[in-house]
Image (cartoon, grey):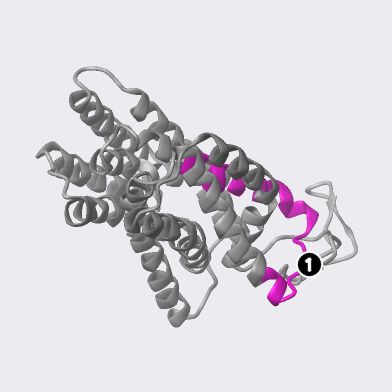
Amino acid sequence: MTTQSSATDRPAIAVSTRADTTSGTRADAPVDPPAGPPAGAPQASGLGTLLAALGVVAFSLTFPATAWGLEGFGPWSLVAVRSVLAALIAGGCLLALRVPLPARRHWAGLAVVAAGVVVGFPLLTTLALRTSTTAHAAVVVGLLPLTTALLSALRMGTRPSRTFWAAALAGAAAVVAFTVQQSGGALTTADLYLFGALLVCAAGYTEGGRLARVMPGWQVIGWALVFCLPLTVFGAALALSHEAVHLTAHSVAGLLWVAAGSQFVGLLVWYRGMALIGVPKASQLQLAQPLLTLVWSVLLLGEHLTPAAPLTAAAVLVCIAVTQRARG
């Protein structure tokens, strides 16, 4: 492996050898490909939609699988071990295909992906699910598409319309009202964990979606997992020495799903789908994730939903749909 170039990077676009007098930079400097989805191919759009939808299904099972995993593992152990297993899968694929290290200019973006979706989101949501139901967590994290769309707009330097901001604030207000009502008048520690998870995951999704336009999506999450491996191996060893482990069918199944299904395969198809159809369209598909998680929480965990949960999820869905239309 070398650090000088990546086989997945597209060639630099050489426009001219003259200096660009309008920008103050040389016009023959390497330029990343355009930020939008690839032009032309309707089948590429269909494939991107399918892949992004598969990612949403995988993500919708994350909270129920985490709840199962917590039956046999402590929260720190579960997060560290799932990341180690996912990194081993990803590293094996990278080695088997002899993929070179990504270019240095992408390392900062991969660090954001690693901090957001490899460490931050799994840890914060797992800590929250010790005391929160999966249905409650699903409604709060239902703001993720909206938060991702907002960070994507800021990252790309666009200026959302007033309608976008109004819908965003309405969705946020609906979720805050739900969490306060469910918590008896005040936000709980679990709610704070969940709101923190929203921010770090949205940042990871946004940066991952950008990187997936210049390298295959599976390599984006693969390298993020591998870069975290020294930290997660140390964390797993430390956590397993302090937290008791009681293996059950549920805990093993939950661990395997969050490691292979959510943390690797799910992110693999999700980033690839975002690269093909763009972050805004992909986030529209993610509207279904909270409602799917509510269904899984009933079918797999036997939870009983309060009327406020599906109503709030539906309200957030409407607000996010408005933001997507307002972006255009």
Q: Report the residue marked by disc 1.
A: 12
- Nearer to me, 3 or 209: 3
From where the camera sits, is residue 253 visible? Answer: yes
From where the camera sits, is residue 153 visible? Answer: no
Where residue 217 sits, quadrant-wise, is bottom right
Q: Residue at x 65, y 69 (%)?
A: 92
Secondary structure at numbered mark 1: loop
Q: Position of residue 201 (x, y in %)?
A: 48, 44
Residue type at the position of mark 1: Ala
25 sits left or right of 99 in the view: right
Q: Position of residue 315 (x, y in %)?
A: 20, 42
Q: Position of residue 232 (x, y in %)?
A: 62, 46
Q: Residue furthest top?
A: 185
Q: Within the magenta stretch, is there residue 48? A: no
234 sits left or right of 172 in the view: right
- Nearer to me, 91 or 20: 91
56 sits left or right of 294 in the view: right
The magenta region covers 94-123
